[in-house]
Amino acid sequence: MYPNGKALYKVNCFIQKEENMSLEVGQMAPDFEAKIETGETIKLSDYRGKKVVLYFYPKDNTPGCTAQACNLRDNYEALQKAGYVVLGISSDAEKSHAKFIEKQSLPFSLIADPDKTVHEAYGTWVEKSMYGRKYMGTARTTFIIDEEGKIAEIIDKVKTKDHTAQILK
């Protein structure tokens, strides 16, 4: 551990990431309990018997995240007809999610994960790099979870403006 403590934190996140990279299609999706934009606590297991689109995105009200959310919003009826429940998740707080939902008229809930517990369970809290600077952030990833709670598909190359087509293909 370095005197500033940062190296230990990065090592712990890296180890956690390595452990979670084992999530594969066919495995049970990690269950979790977290708050949505209303402050209500939900559990993934509450959705057993339904197909779930659980999409991880970096930040409310940013261009790519807004494009992705609006694509899902604009195609929400088709996703519902196909039997999907849509849940977005980022490390933003509930208040931020509530404002994002209102501003973009999103018809689905957003999960607040400020402590990154769910991100870590799904392996989506990763080291990133921009302009040579390394930092921790969300890997934009979507998990399609079947009615039994198993991972049916993992979409890690998300097309923000055409995400619904990737899900409904």
Image (cartoon, rainbow, N blue to C red):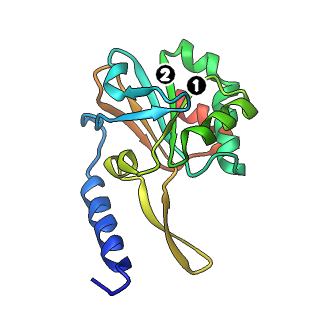
Answer whether residue 100 is visible to the viewer in this image. Answer: yes
Query: Disc 2 designates what residue?
Result: 85
Q: Residues within 10 Å of mark 2 (few under 14, many from 20)?
A: some
- Is the N terminus in the top left, top right, bottom left or bottom right quadrant? bottom left
Q: CA distance from mark 1 to mark 2?
A: 8 Å
Viewer-closest of 150 and 32: 32
The residue nearer to you, when weighing 82 against 103, is 103
Which sits in the foreground, 168 or 44?
Answer: 44
Q: Position of residue 99 (x, y in %)?
A: 68, 36
Q: Is residue 33 above or below residue 120?
A: above
- Residue at image coords 52%, 27%: 86
Q: Looking at the rendering, which quadrant does residue 38 occupy?
A: top right
Q: Residues within 10 Å of mark 1 (few under 14, many from 20)?
A: some
The numbered dot on residue 108 is 1
* Residue type, numbered disc 1: Phe
- Expressed as whole percent of the image width and height from the top left, the position of residue 58 reads 56, 52
Left or right, residue 72 beside residue 169: right
Name which residue lies at 30% across and 26% down. Answer: 149
Which of 160/43 is in front?
Answer: 43
